[in-house]
Image (tube, rainbow, N blue to C red):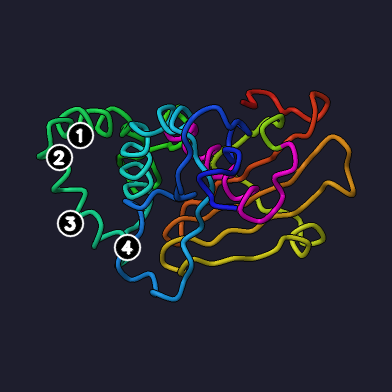
Amino acid sequence: MAMTHEPCAYCGGCQHPRERGHVIQRSLYPSSVPSNVQRPTVPECAECKKIWQDAESQFRNVVLVAGEANDSVTELWNGPVIRSFDKPSGPRWLRDLAAQIVPVETTAGPRRAIYPDRDQRVMIVMRRIIRGFCHYHNLGTAIADCRVFAQVMRYEIPPAFWVRFVPNSLGDQFCRYWYYDLRDEDPDHHSSWVIEFFGRTRFFGIVSANEAGWPEHAA
């Protein structure tokens, strides 16, 4: 069945036109990603796309700024990101990014930092990515009825649990991710996710199968 005829990976609906949507937005892929690496895509309806389309620019910019730059970050920032600030929406994107950068005190003295999970636009996109990967890896059973919680990963996962996560890579300098299918082990939870961008910023996500498994602030 053509992807445009399948239910939307995010809402499960068929009432709106669907297209092939990238789980990770195309604007975030550096040219260094090998051509033989498959870019995950899923059915995406027009109404769902409206929810996060504008937020994707903020997601890209925040993820690129968070942490030390590698070659992929430098390529994207000095190329498409800088050029995007000349577009009609560019000044707003630049202001939105600057508003998330705050002064902090460190042992090395005053610095500036950015906290991706303090920006709701960033987290809307992050939760969408997790839902998309659930569908892409055939974990999408009733995913539209599940809740997704995500935040920047602050703690290490105990080794006994970490070995159960399935590893995947879209290029080590770009994106690596791991998932743990919990459906046969825990009736309240669907899956757990770790998604790393550019070798430094990791997000942790939980997909809850029912209300009993919803962490606080799940959406």
Marker disc for residue 30 = 4
Judging depth in this view, the residue of 197 and 169 nearest the camera is: 169
Residue neighbourhood size for the residue with mark 3, other residues' Cα within 10 Å, grouped as few (<14), some (14–19), many (≥20): few
Q: CA distance from mark 4 to mark 3?
A: 11 Å
The amino acid pointed to by label 2 is Phe
62 relative to 13 in the view: left or right: left
Judging depth in this view, the residue of 16 and 76 nearest the camera is: 16
Residue 187: x %, y % from top left: 88, 38
The residue at 48%/39% (across/down) is: 18
Residue 151 is at least partly visible in this image: yes
Q: Nearer the viewer, mark 1 or mark 4?
A: 4
The amino acid pointed to by label 4 is Pro
The amino acid pointed to by label 1 is Leu
Marker disc for residue 94 = 1
Q: Is 65 contained in the magenta span?
A: no
Residue 86: x %, y % from top left: 9, 40
The answer to the question of whether label 2 and label 1 lie on touching residues, with beta carbons closer than 8 A, is: yes
What secondary structure is marked by label 2?
loop
218 relative to 187 in the view: left or right: left
The answer to the question of whether label 4 and label 2 lie on touching residues, with beta carbons closer than 8 A, is: no
The residue at 81%/48% (across/down) is: 182
> Is residue 195 depicted above or below 125 in this figure?
below
Residue 119 is at least partly visible in this image: no
